[in-house]
Amino acid sequence: MTETTVSAVIFDWGGTLTPWHTVDLHDQWRHYARAYDPAHGEEVSAALRAAEDEAWRRAREEHRATAFDAIVRAAGLEPSGPAHQRGVEAYRAWWEPHTLSDPDVAPLFRALRERGIRVGVLSNTVWPRDDHELVFARDGLLDLIDGAVYTSEIAHTKPHPEAFRAAMAAVGVDRPEHCVFVGDRLFDDIHGARSVGMRAVHVPHSDIPAVQRGHTDGEPDAVVRRLADVLPLVDAWRSGSPRHR
């Protein structure tokens, strides 16, 4: 079998680099709202949840990205000032236990970089870059990432090709066939990556709600049960060994 060049491995974030947690997403906004406006917490949180639901509908159906501040504005609030800052701090505190990185991530990133393979991240997210970098820095990963794209900063979400091209540019690779994408969602991650010519690895750990699933299930090049298994898979592809399933 012919050897394959692997110049970069790009990872999804939530549910891939972090273990999947089934959570009440309305509760994140209750925490924000109670800190923002204690007297009208339920009313404010309902408006925020409705705004976020619409943002994710656009992402799912139209692949249009949205930022956190845009959701706050759509709920009729001002994303600045002391009240907003209190809300953001409460929101971050709520998410803290759900953002811890998988223990396999740091050794995997180091091993890839030791092989001269660049490490990237591409996340469908409304969070700003700073919030993600705080998480990666907390877990000792920030300096192990060569490039990251957060869709809150661009026009499109996965599986739109432009999101994957932006991730390639972030890690300095211009040939999709030299990239491997690792993710937990068969539509956003696997279908999207393969549509642009990347190899795709599925990590089937997440219980994706039906409302978050796309219209197509992509066919992965490989399936791994834990992130540590990505490394021998990449080594096998680089050496020309048959692909694993």
Image (cartoon, rainbow, N blue to C red):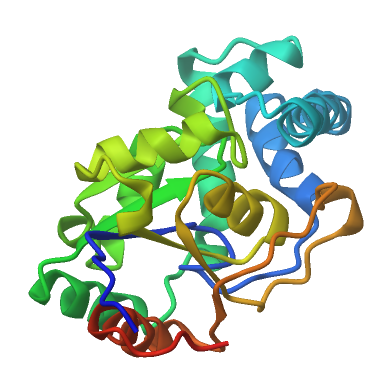
In depth, the one of 245 and 116 nearer the eye is 245
In percent of the image, x 58 and y 43: which residue is there?
Answer: 91
In percent of the image, x 30 and y 68: which residue is there?
Answer: 139
Give the image location of residue 102, x and y in percent.
44, 78
Q: Say whether residue 94 is visible.
A: no
Image vertical order of residue 150 relative to residue 83, above or below: below
Q: Is residue 217 left or right of residue 160?
A: right
Q: Is residue 87 left or right of residue 141?
A: right
Quarter of the image for residue 103 reads bottom left
Q: Say whether residue 187 is visible.
A: yes
Residue with the most extreme front position:
1
In depth, the one of 181 and 89 nearer the eye is 181
Give the image location of residue 65, x and y in percent.
60, 26
In percent of the image, x 59 and y 55: which residue is there?
Answer: 189
Question: In the rendered view of the protein, which quadrant contains the C terminus?
Answer: bottom right
Q: Is residue 2 left or right of residue 219?
A: left
Question: In the rendered view of the protein, which quadrant contains the N terminus?
Answer: bottom left
Give the image location of residue 72, x and y in percent.
65, 20
Give the image location of residue 92, x and y in percent.
51, 47
In depth, the one of 35 and 241 nearer the eye is 241
Image vertical order of residue 53 relative to residue 81, above or below: below
Q: Is residue 117 left or right of residue 225?
A: left
In percent of the image, x 46 and y 84: which residue is there?
Answer: 243
